[in-house]
């Protein structure tokens, strides 16, 4: 940041702070390695086009981190409707995501922000509990 007159300052996004697209790709690759290895979660990915899914996740993570990608968060509900994601499974995915970001030495404030966003979209993804 410069204090010279007439200098402009630009806020650095979380996306830039963590290393941009290469870091997001690494995070997504690691996340799916864990998700596919988890016996409780792997069935959600049967028959799924994983490269396409990873691309969507990278766009979503980039969007959440303030990167150049935008993601239509409102489509998360329709994209997950057929899956009947349980609250416990959703929480498991969130824990893996936080763990991956931690492994990649992402600052804790950014990890917490991602967690808040994931909590805010949970109602779009998780099936309502049976009455």
Image (cartoon, rainbow, N blue to C red):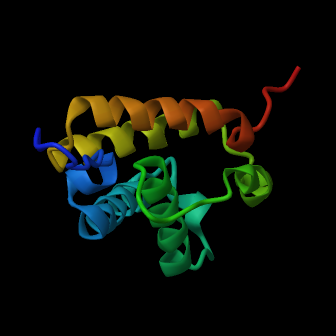
Question: Left or right of 33: which side holds 8?
Answer: left
Q: Quadrant of the N terminus?
A: top left
Q: Is residue 13 visible?
A: yes
Residue 36: quadrant of the picture: bottom left
Residue at image location 53% in from the left, 37% down from the top: 118
Report x, y in % for residue 21.
31, 68
Residue 87: quadrant of the picture: top right
- Residue lying farthest to the top in this orientation: 131
Residue 111, compared with residue 20, is above or below; it is above
Q: Quadrant of the C terminus?
A: top right
Report x, y in % for residue 44.
60, 59
Which one is nearer the viewer's eye here, 19 or 101? 19
Residue 14, compared with residue 45, is above or below; it is above
Q: Is residue 83 visible?
A: no
Residue at image location 45% in from the left, 38% down from the top: 94
Report x, y in % for residue 71.
60, 60
Question: Left or right of 68: which side holds 44?
Answer: right
Question: Left or right of 24: which side holds 44?
Answer: right
How many circles with numbers are drawn on the protein?
A: 0
Question: Left or right of 1: which side holds 115?
Answer: right
Residue 130, compared with residue 50, is above or below; it is above
Which one is nearer the viewer's eye here, 29 or 15? 15
- Residue lying farthest to the right in this orientation: 131
Residue at image location 48% in from the left, 80% down from the top: 51
Report x, y in % for residue 100.
27, 48
């Amino acid at each position: 940041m410069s204090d010279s007159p007439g200098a402009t300052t630009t806020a650095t996004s979380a996306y830039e702070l963590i290393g941009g697209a290469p870091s997001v790709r690494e995070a997504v690759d690691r996340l799916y390695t864990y998700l596919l290895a988890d016996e409780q979660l792997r069935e959600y990915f049967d028959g799924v086009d994983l490269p396409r899914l990873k691309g969507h996740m990278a766009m979503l993570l980039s969007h959440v981190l303030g990167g150049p990608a935008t993601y239509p968060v409102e489509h998360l509900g329709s994209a997950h409707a057929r899956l009947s994601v349980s609250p416990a499974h959703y929480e498991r995915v969130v824990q893996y995501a936080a763990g991956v970001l931690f492994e990649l030495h992402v600052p804790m404030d950014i990890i917490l922000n991602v967690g808040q966003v994931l909590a805010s979209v949970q109602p779009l993804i998780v099936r309502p509990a049976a009455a």
